Image (spheres, rainbow, N blue to C red):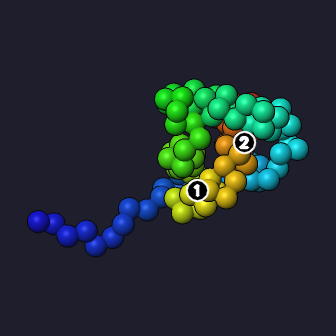
Amino acid sequence: MSVITTQPQLSVAAAHSHWQTGLFDCCSDCGVCVCGTFCFLCLGCQVANNMDECCLCGTSVAMRTLYRTRYHIQGSICKDFMSSMCCLLCSVCQLKRDINRRKEQGIF
């Protein structure tokens, strides 16, 4: 049996980044916020579709955590959970805005 004494570290190529908009930056993309406000399930399905996941997963903490870890965005599962529990609409809108911006930048 081998004992692990050190944890793997991030390489320079996998440096941390940040969310491209804040949790409450609804005015930065009003279309996303209007869609989320009036058809929240549609927004969740759009997010899941963008991530090649099941439509029912688009509004989950797991989806937010998957996206955050895939793009090396700083945070934690605890912060993902708290964002989703305190303001699920804002959390999913932030995720969709980030997806849209990464698509525009060609890094999605």
Q: Position of residue 21 (x, y in %)?
A: 77, 49
Residue furthest front as drawn: 38
Q: Is 102 rendered above or below residue 5?
A: above
Q: CA distance from mark 2 to mark 1?
A: 13 Å
- On screen, residue 95 versus residue 27, left or right, reads left
Residue drawn where x is 52% and y is 37% of the image: 57
Answer few, some or many: residues within 10 Å of disc 2's Cα (few below 14, many 20 plus, some between 14 and 19). Answer: many
Q: Which sits in the foreground, 36 or 21?
A: 36
**Residue under pointer 2:** 93
Callout 2–callout 1 Cβ contact below 8 Å: no
Residue drawn where x is 20% and y is 70% of the image: 3
Which mark, by number, is residue 66? none
| Quadrant placement of the N terminus | bottom left
Q: Amino acid at mark 1?
A: Asp
> Where, by quadrant of the figure, is residue 28 drawn?
top right
Q: Position of residue 27 (x, y in %)?
A: 88, 44
**Residue under pointer 1:** 80
| Quadrant placement of the C terminus | top right
Residue drawn where x is 78% and y is 38% of the image: 37
Q: Which sits in the foreground, 16 or 69?
A: 69
Look at the numbered disc 2 and give the secondary structure of its residue: helix
Residue drawn where x is 67% and y is 43% of the image: 92
Q: Position of residue 44 (x, y in %)?
A: 63, 34
Q: Amino acid at mark 2?
A: Cys
Q: Is residue 2 visible?
A: yes
Q: Is residue 75 visible?
A: no
